[in-house]
Image: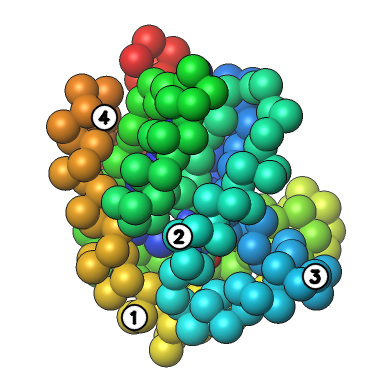
Amino acid sequence: MNVILLGYPGSGKGTQAKVLSQKLGMFHVSTGDIFREELAKKTALGQEVAGYLNAGRLVPDRLVLDVLKARLGAETRGLLFDGFPRTVEQAEGLDSWFGSRGQAIDAVVFLNVPEAEVARRLGARRTCSGCGRIYNVISAPPGKEGVCDACGKGLVTRDDDKPAVIERRLQVYRDQTEPLLAYYRASGNFYEADGSLPPETVAEKLSSMLRRP
Ligand code: AMP
């Protein structure tokens, strides 16, 4: 089974994808995590995408697709996409790539959260510098301030979770990613979940949804 999680940055895609991929034995594919990893390792790709990430703009479609094809060529588990596709062009590229491999997208799940709520969440988001676990300093803080409960490493504010960049990312979502809702709504395997509910409740709903899409 291959699944796409859609939604605003801050709608809970990363948090849910981590839980679901474990529960359902799927491979979590976060293009944002891939780019941040390359950036941290200072690879050529990392340097190429740095400007886009830091400004809250999208990495060009062709580059995103090439990176994914290179990374996922040999993966046999079901894929759980988080943060991809981000444009209609990427969705079309994914369709033709999957078509050539005899694969399909089995479900597209839209995590619906009002924009004011995602803006609030992004401002309060902290990410573990070690394992990537996501916290919210207001609604889901760690046991010890600034320290990850899971691995003990320090928590950081992602550069693109800083106020100036948040507004740009929301704008980019409205302009370039929101049209994907219409694209996938027409596909017949589109599901919607209320992403403003507590994360555990959303996780329950999503796993029962995906166990029988
Ligand atoms: P995310 O962690 O998904 O919010 O992604 C962080 C940043 O990585 C985005 O603001 C973009 O700069 C870049 N990025 C991640 N996924 C994509 C994608 N599918 N297409 C273009 N850029 C992306």
Q: Which residue is mark 3?
A: 43
Identify the secondary structure beneath mark 1. helix
Q: Quadrant of the C terminus?
A: top left
Cα distance, mark 4 to mark 1? Answer: 27 Å
Q: Disc 1 marks which amino acid?
A: Glu
Q: Mark on residue 167?
A: 1
Within 10 Å of disc 1 (Cα), the crowding (few <14, some 14-19, many 20+) is some
Q: Tell me residue 150's x, y (percent).
A: 77, 49
Counting residues from the start of the chain, the first of labels 3 and 1 encountered is 3
Amino acid identity at mark 4: Tyr
- Tag 1 near tag 2, CB within 8 Å: no
Q: Is residue 212 above or below residue 67?
A: above
Where's residue 211, x and y in %?
Answer: 44, 13
Q: Nearer the viewer, mark 2 or mark 3?
A: 2
Q: Find the distance from the CA under tag 2 to the CA under tag 3.
A: 19 Å
Q: Nearer the viewer, residue 203 or 146?
A: 203
The amino acid pointed to by label 3 is Thr
Residue 43 in the figure: left or right of residue 100: right
Badge 2 amino acid: Asp
Distance between the alpha carbons at the discs numbered 1 and 2: 21 Å
Residue 166 found in image quarter? bottom left
Residue at image point 23% right, 66% down: 174
Find the distance from the CA under tag 3 to the CA under tag 1: 28 Å
Determine whether the beta carbon of the residue marked 3 sits less than 8 angstroms from the nearest atom of ligand 1.
no
Helix, strand or loop status at disc 4? strand
Q: Nearer the viewer, mark 4 or mark 2?
A: 2
User: Which mark is drawn over residue 99?
Assistant: none
Task: Reply above or below: 158 against 30.
Answer: below
The quarter of the picture where residue 27 lies is: top right
Quarter occupied by residue 144:
bottom right
| Residues at marks 3 and 4, CA–CA distance in whole angstroms | 37 Å
Query: What residue does disc 2 label?
Result: 61
